[in-house]
Amino acid sequence: MDPIAQVQTAGGSYPVLCGDDAPALLAQLWDARWRQAALIGDSNTLPRFGPALAAALAPRCGEVLQLAFPAGEAHKTRATKQQLEDCLLEAGFERGGCVVGVGGGIALDVAGFVASTLLRGVAHVNVATSLLAQVDAAIGGKTGVNTAQGKNLIGTFHQPRAVLIDCAALASLPAAELRNGLAEAVKHAVLADAPLFAALEAWADARVGDAPLPRPLLARCVQIKAEVVSRDEREQAFRQVLNFGHTVAHAIEAASAHAVAHGAAVAIGMVVEARVAERLCGFPVADRERLERLLATLGLPTAPPLPFAAVRELLGHDKKTRAGVVHCALPARLGQMHEAAGRWALPTPIELLAELWEPVR
Ligand SMILES: NC(=O)c1ccc[n+]([C@@H]2O[C@H](COP(=O)([O-])OP(=O)(O)OC[C@H]3O[C@@H](n4cnc5c(N)ncnc54)[C@H](O)[C@@H]3O)[C@@H](O)[C@H]2O)c1
């Protein structure tokens, strides 16, 4: 099967494959030198998808381990990573094995982090089962866990050997999780592709119920993520565009103790940061209105559920903060991010965020 995208990295390139039969795809791409497999997923995804993946791998490698941790951001922690590592070491997992992350962004971020430090780094493959992981988290090699200070503050860059997008898995994905994935799809359109944004608008207006994202639109989102990562693997500059909406989103997630899911928080974050973009870099009012309308049509929230005071401190813990100044990656117009002297995240006065937290009436 032809990949829908190829990610270029300093260490070589890897494919993103998309299909309805993830076990068969995994078996096909399996490197015969990987003598052990460790499938790592959360308590929803591993029981659901692990057995078929393990059965497909059994003829290809000597041993297939299956490890699950409790689902949810509260378990995306160093403690979970440590427990998984202890299990793998006790089971005699060796450097020549391959970790297979199975699940949404949380399972893949944790599995990738385990793979990146276990025995000083082992191979890993991502099997993405949530829409959010398929269009975003599975691609690009960012791994990590949360701490009390904020989201994803401990982690590594560790590129997978391949990414599998399990389209059939979406059949069991709860509708709210489907919507969370759509938030990142909208983000990709805003940052790189105005025609994709228009296509999402047309699809959102015409769709009935929680219909899944049509495959050509999903594929375009994957390609945008792959293109951005290939241009700037380690977020030296350009990759920061992927953080549109995320400065605010991460603070909302932490302040709500993860009651607001990542995708929903990104939707709210994009709306707040679009207001900032209007002020700081001329993002057209009409574009901001289209963004808000599309998110609302998709059933995503657009207003912060917390007062600004609840996030003020947390905004300063964002990874893009420099010299205590909060930075936001902001759009110049739909399909194009703002750049200033090679920088893709702008210093953003905290008082401006406070002022624009709620819509100006
Ligand atoms: N590494 C990156 O580049 C990157 C990018 C974006 C987001 N993220 C991270 O991803 C996380 C969010 O990912 P998410 O939205 O996928 O959340 P998630 O991993 O929690 O998955 C959402 C929920 O759906 C369940 N689930 C997943 N696939 C399923 C399926 N096919 N059927 C039934 N249930 C299924 C999961 O068990 C979970 O309960 C955040 O922690 C975020 O920080 C990482």
Image: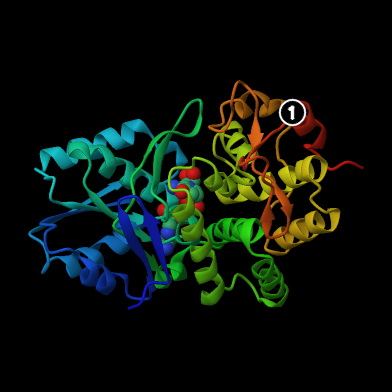
Q: Position of residue 152 (x, y in %)?
A: 46, 36
Residue 221 vs 275, above or below: the answer is below
Horizontal relation, residue 270 to residue 159: left or right: right
Residue 160 horizontal/vertical position (percent): 32, 53
For label 1, the SS is loop
Q: Nearer the viewer, residue 109 or 42?
A: 109
| Quarter residue 139 falls in | bottom left
Residue 300 appearing in the image = no
Quadrant in the picture for residue 88: top left
Question: Along the line of sight, which residue is nearer the eye, 160 or 84?
Answer: 160
Q: Residue at x 33, y 61 (%)?
A: 14
> At 85% across and 53% down in the image, what residue appears?
285
Visible residue check, residue 27: yes
Quadrant housing the C terminus: top right
Residue 295 in the image, given as x and y percentages of width and height: 70, 58
Give the residue at x 32% y 31%.
Answer: 79
Residue type pointed to by label 1: Pro
From the viewer's perspective, is 198 left or right of 99? right
The residue that label 1 is drawn on is 349
339, above or below 103, in the image: above
Q: Nearer the viewer, residue 195 or 231?
A: 231
Which image quadrant: the N terminus? bottom left
Instruction: Give the residue drawn at x 61%, y 34%.
Output: 251
Q: Establish if 325 lies above or below 290.
A: above
Would residue 276 appear left or right of 178 to someone viewing this image? Answer: right
